[in-house]
Image (tube, rainbow, N blue to C red):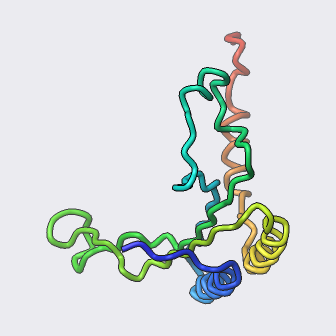
Amino acid sequence: MAKEHLSNEAFFTQLTSLIEKTQQKGHGAVYLTQKRLTFDASSTTTTAQKIADDPLWDLNPPNPLPLIIRATDGKSHKLGPEGTKGGKGGRTKNADKVKLKTVVQPDDLDAFFAKYAEVCKAGMQSLKKRDRSKRKKASKKKGGAGTGGDGKV
């Protein structure tokens, strides 16, 4: 059902191969998310007292919390054989979706983010700069033809 978390090194090797595979195809996306991991089965706290003292008590935990880092290729669904979204040829769950996740302990954050930045920068080298010249020309045409907004003719 749910996969186990990868070690940090295994996460980096699989993330690098995911980025390279996406680059070789020439299209696609890699989604990276991170959030703090707040669930801890061993800690039981009295939340009612903490909420009464400070309404934002969970923003300042007594101990640093670990982070969960996730990466995916974003292919959650694929179109059916007919290519339509409804009926028999509708979207189905994609079993080929790549999901990677790892947990980073607070003590390892600096080393992890240094390596994470290297991997992400290496993956961004093949990106192309967006061509915004068409949009700028269209906005100049729209902006120059008006009365200026003061209502005078």
Q: Nearer the viewer, residue 87 or 77?
A: 77
Eyeballing the image, is 72 above or below 9? above
Location of residue 57 in the rendering, given as x and y in whole percent from the top left corner: 66, 32
Is residue 42 or residue 86 the one in the foreground? 42
Q: Residue furthest top?
A: 152
- Residue at the image position 66 percent from the left and 47 percent from the top: 138
> At x 63% / y 25%, what residue is drawn?
55
How many numbered discs? 0
> Vertically, is 108 above or below 39?
below
Left or right position of 77 against 146: left
**Left-right relation of 1 to 80:** right
Residue 84's image quarter? bottom left
Figure quadrant of the N terminus:
bottom left
Q: Position of residue 29 (x, y in %)?
A: 57, 72
Q: Residue furthest left?
A: 88
Residue 38 vertical position relative to residue 13 in the rendered view, above or below? above
Residue 40: name its quadrant.
bottom right
Residue 147: quadrant of the picture: top right
Where residue 78 appears, as percent x and y from the top left, is 34, 74
Q: Answer with left or right where residue 46 lies relative to residue 57.
A: left
Q: Quadrant of the C terminus?
A: top right
From the top left corner, tell me how far across and down residue 131 is, in percent. 71, 63
User: Residue at the location (72% across, 65% down)?
Assistant: 105
Residue in front for this viewpoint, 71 or 137: 71
Q: Residue at x 66, y 22 (%)?
A: 53
